[in-house]
Amino acid sequence: MAEDEIDGREERGGEAAGPLGPATALRTDRCGTLSAADVDRQVTLCGWVAHRREHGEKLAFVDLRDHTGVVQCVIRTGTGDGRDSFMDGQPTDAPDVRTEFVLRVAGTVRRRREGTTNPDLATGEVEIGDCTVEVLSAAETPPFPIDERGPATDETLRLKHRYVDLRRDRMQRNLRLRARVNSAIRGAMDDQGFLEVETPMLMASTPEGARDFLVPSRLRPGSFYALPQSPQLFKQLSMVGGIDRYYQIARCMRDEDLRADRQLEFTQLDAEMSFGSQEDVLQAIGYAVRAAASAAGHELGEIRRLTWRQAQERFGSDKPDVRFGMELIELTPLFAATGFNAFKAPCVKAIIVAGGASLGRGRTDALTDLAKSFGAKGLAWLKRSSDDAALEGPILKFLSEEERAGLPGTAGDLLLFVADQRPLVNKVLGLLRLELGRPPVNEGGLHAVWVVDFPLFDGIDDAGRPMSAHHPFTMPHLDDLGMLETDPLAVRSQAYDLVLNGWELGSGSVRIHRGDIQQQVFEVLGIGAEEAEQKFGFLLDAFRYGAPPHAGFAFGIDRLVALLAGEENIREVIAFPKTQSGTDPLTGAPAPVAARDLELYGLRPLPPPT
């Protein structure tokens, strides 16, 4: 390609001046960027053959694809003079060019003939004519179609050949969206005076709730590093070190069961600030999430705020999806003196399924089975007639006139009741609510909620001791300090979660920096001085040298990008994820290691199964 052609592209504000990067020695333009404004211009493109269509004996239409899109190239075939096609610098015949061949095409941009334009294609008004084609790389038939219009491909096959799967428009969009989100998050944190600090990937094993991935030490056989579940301790040490405001887009690893929103290794925005309150953290993180949403073309409105108790009582979950109603309705007072044995329970609640009166008996039986699978003893139901809202259903005969009169709902509604202990009632109805009403992840816009005032402790262990709901360094509500010894399960924490469209994005808390409060919490948890020193000694030692009040947060970038991309599974926004079973079909990981290599680390292979 002549230098004046490249220079001309620069002068007219093309790639050299745009976001796609400068022209290179092999190409002047990207496939999906050409339009009618480029007619009569000489261009050179590089990409993969998306489709090839024969047009008589002398012409072929080749759709050339790169990450920006597709453009049609008109190629002369069968000339026999080798003038049109080359492979590795040698003449070849254009008919040999097949799907997924990598080509360099030089030609002239021209308008498509009338009646042949493609309104569904960004480049549908133009094509490349007078083409010279160079085959940069031949390709075998791919293991599955790149075109997404066909049937869905098995995910394991996609992951085994991820390098092919990544060429698909969906994956290209998602990964480029992820890059924009990361950039926006960094910009937002920089704007607020946070300093990006990298923390170790090899550290000591610490109790953080999930299982560690352990790395054996060759220099110290029998000893192990752990891969970080989070940078939690190091970011708190950074506050002691005067960093003031820290952030990191951090890689974290947890050996836990996988699901749609969880991977063994994941990426999170990790942040901490000194001399900051809970309110300061919520403002800083909200700013970053809004910036990320804006970079993805979404608008995030005001972030609502609910206490943990409000979320449980109204939505049956500490990660409420507030895009739809169907809130839990308190009916315990109505049935306080009931004669219906099934409702003689500490808590009775219901949800209303609008228009659900049309559901048949098979569907209500299925919902009953589902409620039982969630832990309920059963599920009671009533319907309101679509004509006059009169109640009907199998439990109606057991209810008094006063109880019937006090029931909610309008014509055509289905009422679903659960009676049991309050936490179980909330859980079961909360799960039924999602089953019956939750919209797809990409519907209804973005609705975020801060859930605050979590309990400091989460139940009792086998020894009768309270268990930390988050970690033992979470600051209790100062108003509740007097209950640490008398009623620890009633103590609220200064912990908070961010929930987006029903997905928990992340969590954080104000940290304990006062030695007297830390000692009280350790005593309630049954952690003695020796155990505390063994597990957290280096952090406690650091606190003795002047720890500022500090608070922090972390949220999952994989989850955020999935929501912004409208994906139900975070694997669709990760370049090389693991399967649901934790394996990598591409590389075969995890895989056995040779015995001689294990010996370097003081390890022995497992004996063969008997």
Image (cartoon, grey):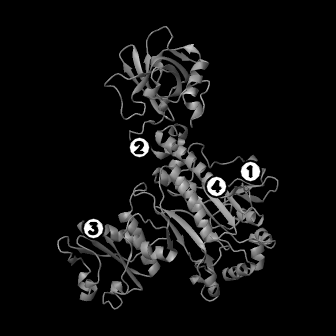
In the image as oriented, which residue stretches furthest toward the top? Answer: 81
Q: In whole angstroms, how far apart are the C-alphas of marks 2 and 1?
A: 41 Å
Query: Based on the displayed image, in which of its 4 quarters is residue 481 positioned?
Result: bottom right
Residue marked by disc 2: 152
- Disc 3 vs disc 4: which is toward the camera? 4
* Label located before the other in sequence (3 or 2): 2
- Disc 3 vs disc 2: which is toward the camera? 3
Identified by mark 1, the residue type is Leu
Residue 258 image position (x, y, % from top left): 54, 58
- Disc 1 vs disc 3: which is toward the camera? 3
Residue 156 image position (x, y, % from top left): 50, 45
Answer whether residue 140 is visible to the viewer in this image: no
> At 35% from the left edge and 16% from the top edge, which residue is drawn?
56
Query: Based on the displayed image, in which of its 4 quarters is residue 316 positioned?
Result: bottom left
> At 35% from the left edge and 65% from the top edge, which residue is drawn?
436
* Label located before the other in sequence (4 or 2): 2
Any mark on residue 356, and which? 3
